[in-house]
Image: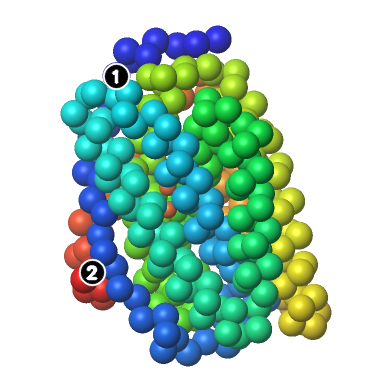
Amino acid sequence: MTISANKPASTSTKAAIKPRRMQFDTKNMQMHQFAIEDNSLISTFFYALSAMFPEGERFFIHSVRHYQKSISDPAMTADIKGFIGQEAHHGRCHDDLNEAIERLGIPMSLVTDNMDKRINMLKTRLGPERQLALTVAMEHFTASLAEFLLENPEVFDQAPEVLRQMLLWHAVEEIEHKAVAFDIYRLKVNKEWMRRRVMVIAMITLFSRIAFFQMRMLWKTKHMPSLKEWAGATRFFWGKKGILRANVKGVRKFFQRDFHPNDIDQSALIDGWEKRYPEIAAQEA
Ligand SMILES: [Fe+2]
Ligand SMILES: [Fe+2]
């Protein structure tokens, strides 16, 4: 099934997509091995995500660039430029963060090397339409995750300030550009069955890989999570305000008929964020 590519992209107010050149001081970051919520299972979840981001985000840019020249609409062209600028900078900042985490003995390069090979495989095996569908799926996942983090910023209360600031800034920009790949997909590909099917495969693959990378990180650091950590992690992921419980809800919306990312109004989370987080806004170069 396809739906009209002329359908308006959104009925809600659209935030401008502005790449910000942030400079986080990861070099002098003081941090203990499992600093997020003081829990190895929760910390390695975010470490695995951070290690997957740089190559993943460069892949998103690659999939969008394939269509960039064939788009003449000035608003979309500006959005694509903003999207590429933001994702490129996210990748660089996470590279720095990943190096800092690696210094703690967490095998981040194991994940980045694995991602490098996998992304090269995806670029050769998947055609441009499927590559873009995968980006659309992952962009929806990251926007749902961003919504959770901006609604629950206390998740990073025990984490180093640099890590907290970087992930919250990343969350803001993920929401700002959440519809860019989707709008290109609707205009150029517009296959609803492919969009949904790729999301199912993407989520199964993503979560099994995160779990695998977490196991490798715990193995390498010779850390056996305690019962207290398991209980805390179960609450954190699947409890009433659990991150994965919220994410399942968010991802489910993607399967609705005629879904568009801007149908979910997350503007309150990003409008005026610089005033709510002046210490993060101050990191812009
Ligand atoms: Fe990003
Ligand atoms: Fe993104």
Is 178 located above or below residue 127 in the figure?
A: below
Q: Position of residue 231 (x, y in %)?
A: 73, 70
Which of pointers 2 and 1 lies earlier in the amino acid sequence? Answer: 1
Q: Horizontal placement of 201 versus 146: left or right? A: right
Residue 169: which quarter of the image?
A: bottom left
Secondary structure beneath disc 1? loop
The disc labelled 1 sits on which kind of residue? Pro
The disc labelled 2 sits on which kind of residue? Glu
Residue 44: which quarter of the image?
A: bottom right
Is 114 located above or below residue 31 in the figure?
A: above
Alpha carbon separation for disc pair 2 and 1: 33 Å
Is 114 located above or below residue 203 in the figure?
A: below
Q: Residues within 10 Å of mark 2 (few under 14, many from 20)?
A: few
Residue 284 numbered mark, or none: 2
Label 1, ligand 2: CB separation under 8 Å: no
What residue is at 45 percent from the left and 73 percent from the top? 96
Asked if marks 2 and 1 touch (Cβ < 8 Å), the reply is no
Q: Position of residue 250 (x, y in %)?
A: 52, 40
Is 165 located above or below residue 136 in the figure?
A: below
What residue is at 26 percent from the left and 54 percent from the top? 19
Q: Horizontal placement of 218 versus 117: left or right? A: right
Secondary structure beneath disc 2? loop
* Residue topped by disc 1: 8
